[in-house]
Amino acid sequence: MDGLAVIGIGAGLAIGLAAMGSGLGQGNAAGHALEGMARQPEASNEIRTTLLLALAFMEALTLFSFVIAILLWTKIG
Amino acid sequence: MGGRMAQLAMVMEELKPAVVFHVGPIPITTTVVTTWIVMALLVVIAWVTTRKMELKPRGWQHLPEMAVEFILGFLESFLGKNGRKYLPLVATLFILILTLNLSWLIPGSKPPTMDLSTTLAFAVVTILAVQILSIYEVGVRRYVHTFTSHGLALLPLNIIEELVKVVSLSLRLYGNMFGEETVVTILFILVPLVVPACIQLLGILFGFIQAFIFTLLTISYLTTRTEAH
């Protein structure tokens, strides 16, 4: 296997694994938030704001690896 | 396969901001030009909609009032009556980032927020403003105390935390906008019709959410920094 192929696989794995992790995390958070909203509709505004904040923090992790994947990818071309 | 790779490489080249002209040694890129256009647009909208202000809003005067009241509601839910002080900073950030995110609706322009320079500038300004406002609010002694309250050993960690906020704030906005635009452009090569349009429709939503999250994080940083520990 030559170096370029390894870089390609690395870039693909980086973004794929990160997307998997933050997808699981965000799904979990959103699911519980929805549950909370269904139980207490009057608190839904507060829950929504906090949920968005939490999702933003989880999203950041994927984006860090997205940047790494792009950096790796530019090495190939 | 080789042809497609070459096409992709061309797309990536196209997504970078192009240099339009030079002012002395400083290159002026499309990012800056689009930001100027958006700024001019916002000034014109603000001037036109508030030219004949009335106590009871009528017609276009609703537009700026809606935006300001939206942000004010969030500020006050976090900081109480105290939040009104920070309205100029936070509302300006929200309105400017929202318009920049949606500026790809102007034909031939790319959102300036998909350039890391723009988002980094926003993040640096925001975090610096938060530090200065918190010194102003709680005084120098208590400001320093928030860094050393859990022992001197944690001081470097606390300082790094502030610096990482700049990185994460800028990378979040940049990554989202850049990723969205890249996906649309690559989809245009693969399926030229319909599918990219659907993603672009989502892009309007994402542009709004990203601007909202940026301001939300600004508010929450303000809250944690300006409240006495």
Image: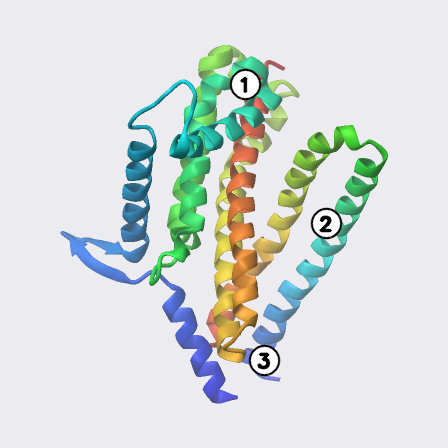
* Residue plotted at (64% across, 38% down): A53
Image location of residue B94, percent across then percent down: 46, 36
Q: For the view shown, which residue lies furthest in the left direction?
A: B24
- Relative placement, left or right, of B138 versus B59 is right
Give the vertical position of A4 relative to B99 (above or below).
below
Residue sitting nearer the eye, B55 or A3: B55
Label 3: which residue?
A: A5
Quote the CA–CA distance across marks 3 and 2. 31 Å
Mark number displayed over residue B226: 1
Q: Secondary structure at mark 3?
A: helix
Q: Which mark is residue B77?
A: none
Q: Residue furthest right?
A: A39
Q: The residue marked by circle 3 belongs to what chain?
A: A
From the viewer's perspective, is the residue at label 3 or at label 2 nearer?
2
Is label 2 in contact with label 1 (beta carbons under 8 Å)? no
User: What is the CA distance from the residue labelled 3 to the residue labelled 1?
Assistant: 50 Å
Tell me the amino acid under the disc marked 1: Thr
Residue B167: % across, % down: 50, 44
Q: Secondary structure at mark 1?
A: helix
Subunit under mark 1: B
The residue at the point 50 percent across, 26 percent down is: B69
Q: Are marks 2 and 1 on the same chain?
A: no
* Residue B96 % position (x, y): 40, 40
Can you tell which quarter of the image residue B99 is in?
A: top left
Seen in the picture, residue A25 relative to B71 is either above or below; the reply is below
